[in-house]
Image (cartoon, helix red, strand yellow):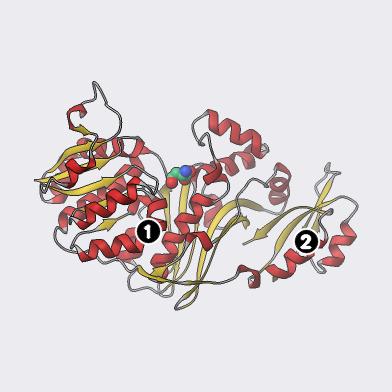
Amino acid sequence: MINIAVLGYGTVGSGVVEVIEKNKEMVNKKSAQELNIKYILDLRDFPGDPYEEKVVHDFNLILSDDSVSIVCETMGGVGAAYQFTKQALEKGKSVCTSNKELVARHGPELLAIARDHSCNYLFEASVGGGIPIIRPLNYSLTAEKIEAITGILNGTTNYILSKMEKEGAGFEEVLKEAQENGYAERNPEADVEGYDACRKIAILSSLMMGRNVDSEKVYTEGITNITAADFAYAAAAGRSIKLLARSRAVSEDEVLAMVAPFMIGRDHPLAMVNDVFNAVFVTGNMLGDSMYYGRGAGKLPTASAVVSDVIDCARHQGRVIMCFWDQGNARLSDISSEERSFFIRGKSGEERTVESAFPEGRLIRIEGRAEDFGYFTPVMREKDFMEKCKALEDVVLGRIRLL
Ligand code: HSE
């Protein structure tokens, strides 16, 4: 029998307990032994809950119990969660987590502690919720040189953008509705400003490079400036707008990573990923493109990924599962030298100004829209585009990168 402790009995923590309970027979069979939830750590009591008796408030109880060999950290945050994870690993207890903030901030350090203590720090649920993506990168694609990763890594923003596209509605209106329906947090900043996607692409980029990609240095733009008008022009051009997290290996130790809204062709596989779904598009030098798709958030999908890690730990007791993520930092390329086309939404009457600033682009108009026009620039350097836009501040109403 393997004893487990669950830290945090919130949405994901209670999901972990539910998955282990519901799939008990199969989970035990795959773990080659019985998994027993011995403790649930939470500040609150849960009177009437079937697991009420297991709830404890003192982490030291778990830490000092040598019979506990696997800990599920589903608390979130980088305060107590960091301390508890570190202490558990130092005691040789494996930790499975859904906490992307902690993995992005302290991943390589915690992996090194786990290695030194012959246990594991696994984090399948930290990116893409229930979608297997960490394990494919770590195990299945090990023969590949991963060249690029592009993902829709945030369900909240994908839901908002999908609804704006379908209903022709504005950002604020859809956000409010998403909050009322529980699809967006009351404080939506981490999602709509792109910070959540940024942490996730930093984790994936680190695994792609085998060295640490600092999430704080990744260029990040959210979706708050995207308007219904932008979607009208995207539709007229046969495109969609998605918040993409992108990463490309520039050399052995240099990576280009960014998060921003992109206008993408309707025929791109990522354009078909709608609502709260996530997808990760991985390009390897032998396999070519592959895509991983599914539910990127939610109680049971995320818990399922945590439990898959628990089973992996159970199967590898006393052995370290390889993860190529060293503590040395990868260099991050400056995105300003990237080359691409851009979409501009310009103020009506200023078509000539935009055409002469960005010659040889394509002008588009939508019947009935008198206030603005659309313009697709030719391929140009990001730096040159931004400089020109700055000089045309009163003319450029909106701008979106093209993929
Ligand atoms: N807020 C995140 C999302 C939850 O919307 O995707 C899963 O990490």
What secondary structure is marked by label 2?
helix
Q: Amino acid at mark 1?
A: His
Q: Is residue 188 visible?
A: yes
At 30% across and 50% down in the image, what residue appears?
83
Count of numbered circles in the view = 2
Instruction: Please tell me in which quadrant of the rendered image residue 327 appears.
Output: bottom left
- Of the 4 image quadrants, the one containing the C terminus is bottom right
**Quick check: 57 left or right of 126?**
left
**Residue 46 position (above or below residue 69):** above
What secondary structure is marked by label 1?
helix
- Residue that protrudes farthest toward the top in the picture: 48
At 65% across and 33% down in the image, what residue appears?
173
Residue identifier under label 1: 106
Instruction: List x then y, in percent, for residue 258.
Output: 55, 61
Q: Is residue 379 visible?
A: no
Q: Amino acid at mark 2?
A: Cys
Whether label 1 lies within 8 Å of ligand 1 gets the answer no
